[in-house]
Image: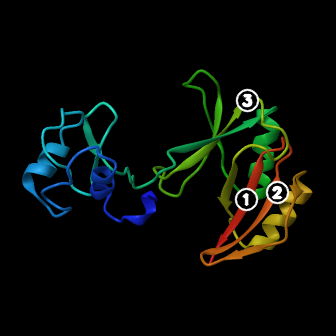
Amino acid sequence: MHLGDHKNPAQILYDLGVRDPSPCGGKENRDCHNFANTPDTPLSAGVCDGHYITNTGKMTKMTFQPQNALVWAEIPVTNLPSAMEFYKTVFNYTLTIDDTGPNPIAILPTADGTGTAAHLYPGKPASDGTGATLHLAVPDALEPTVERFKKAGGEVLSPPVTIPVGRFVYGLDPDGNSIGMFEAA
């Protein structure tokens, strides 16, 4: 049996011999949904297709879908003042230093100050291009940003890539961090 053969996770659990499928069948059933809203409650009833049983016999929500999966991103740099100048030059950022934590960090701004952002911090970058790729919004158009990226010491790795939501170019910042320069459609 392939797990993908079934659309209803409760049916998958039933087929695996874990528990009977839910009496609520995935519909809003007060008993199942109230029960599921108490995390790690011992299982005493079936589950709907929005929940599953853990290997300890507890029931929990099937999926976690936050508004923003990314909370923040950290970009390690070997020289914070030099990296701040690079990102200011390329992306026209006004970077601010925050020294309230264990390390000073330079915060990449958001329009309203509350959105998902990133920061630069003194650290050891991954080997060239082997870390995560962070895609940063360009301040104007893609091509001028790519030119500033090159002139400021970054290495451009790709031609523009078009996707339904916009275009981007891959590059490495002077510390070898993988950066995508993204222009929305």
Question: For this view, does 27 lie left or right of residue 124?
Answer: left
Residue 169 sits above or below residue 128 on the image: below
Q: Disc 1 marks which residue? A: 180
Residue 118, percent from left and from top = 60, 45
Secondary element at image label 3: strand
Single out the mark in the foreground, 3 or 2: 2
Q: Earlier in the sequence, mark 2 or mark 1?
A: 2
Question: For this view, does 7 lie left or right of residue 126?
Answer: left
Secondary element at image label 1: strand
Q: CA distance from mark 2 to mark 1?
A: 6 Å
The colour scheme of the drawn protein is: rainbow
Verify CB contact (< 8 Å) between mark 2 and mark 1: yes
Q: Quadrant of the N terminus?
A: bottom left
The structure residue drawn at horizontal position 18% and vertical position 33%, both measured from the top left corner, is: 41
Q: In the rendered image, which quarter is residue 143 located in?
A: bottom right
Residue 183 sits above or below residue 134 on the image: below
Residue sticking out furthest to the left: 30
Q: Disc 2 marks which residue? A: 171
Q: Earlier in the sequence, mark 1 or mark 3?
A: 3
Please state which amino acid type lies under the numbered disc 2. Answer: Gly
Residue 185 sits above or below residue 30 on the image: below
Please state which amino acid type lies under the numbered disc 1. Answer: Gly
Q: Disc 3 marks which residue? A: 122
Q: Considering depth in this image, is 54 or 156 the residue closer to the camera? A: 54
Q: How many marks?
A: 3
Residue 2, percent from left and from top = 46, 59
